Image: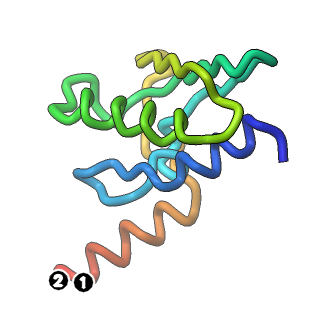
Amino acid sequence: MNLEDRILTALEEVLDPEVGVNIVDLGLVYEVSADENGKVKIEMTLTIPECPLADEIVEQVKKTVSQLPGVKEVDVRLVWEPRWTPARMNDRAREEIRARMSAVE
């Protein structure tokens, strides 16, 4: 497994605190790249630009990725284009959200 794949797998542990689903399944991670020197660049978005937990999510991403072997530096860039929509979620995210909503009802 290459470093980019390991990064995406690790990011599945980072949850959007308001939704309770990981940021990969939600479709918030747009691009991951790593060079041979261990410098990682991540482009991601949030469900809404004015997310009050933006700093917390970005810090969790940096902390999670920086713990991977071979990673020396992590640069996280929040982008707003393309805008996030629920269509970016995968089926696993949809199922988790449905299950949470059913449990509340």
Residue 47 picture location, percent across and down: 34, 36
Q: Would residue 51 be found to the left or right of residue 75 on screen?
A: left
Query: Residue at coordinates 23% horizontally, 51% vertically from top-left?
Result: 18
Query: Residue at coordinates 32% horizontally, 59% vertically from top-left?
Result: 20
Vertical placement of 45 versus 10: above or below?
above
Q: From the viewer's side, name the closer residue of 47 and 62.
A: 62
Q: Secondary structure at mark 2?
A: loop
Q: Nearer the viewer, mark 1 or mark 2?
A: 1
Q: Would residue 42 be found to the left or right of residue 47 on screen?
A: right
Residue 26 picture location, percent across and down: 47, 48
Query: Residue at coordinates 37% horizontally, 66% vertically from top-left?
Result: 97
The amino acid type of the residue labelled 1 equals Ala
Q: CA distance from mark 1 to mark 2?
A: 6 Å
Based on the displayed image, in which of its 4 quarters is residue 8 positioned?
top right
Q: From the viewer's side, name the closer residue of 97 and 35.
A: 35
The answer to whether residue 63 of the structure is visible from this angle is yes
The answer to whether residue 87 of the structure is visible from this angle is no
Q: From the viewer's side, name the closer residue of 10 and 44.
A: 10
- Residue that label 2 marks: 105
Query: Residue at coordinates 71% horizontally, 32% vertically from top-left?
Result: 70
Q: Would residue 2 be found to the left or right of residue 67 on screen?
A: right
Vertical placement of 95 versus 82: above or below?
below
Q: Quadrant of the C terminus?
A: bottom left
Label 2 CA crowd tier, 10 Å (few <14, some 14–19, many 20+): few
Vertical placement of 33 versus 47: above or below?
above
Q: Would residue 26 be found to the left or right of residue 101 on screen?
A: right
Label 1–label 2 contact, CB within 8 A:
yes
The amino acid type of the residue labelled 2 equals Glu
All told, the count of numbered labels is 2
- Residue that label 1 marks: 103
Q: Secondary structure at mark 1?
A: helix
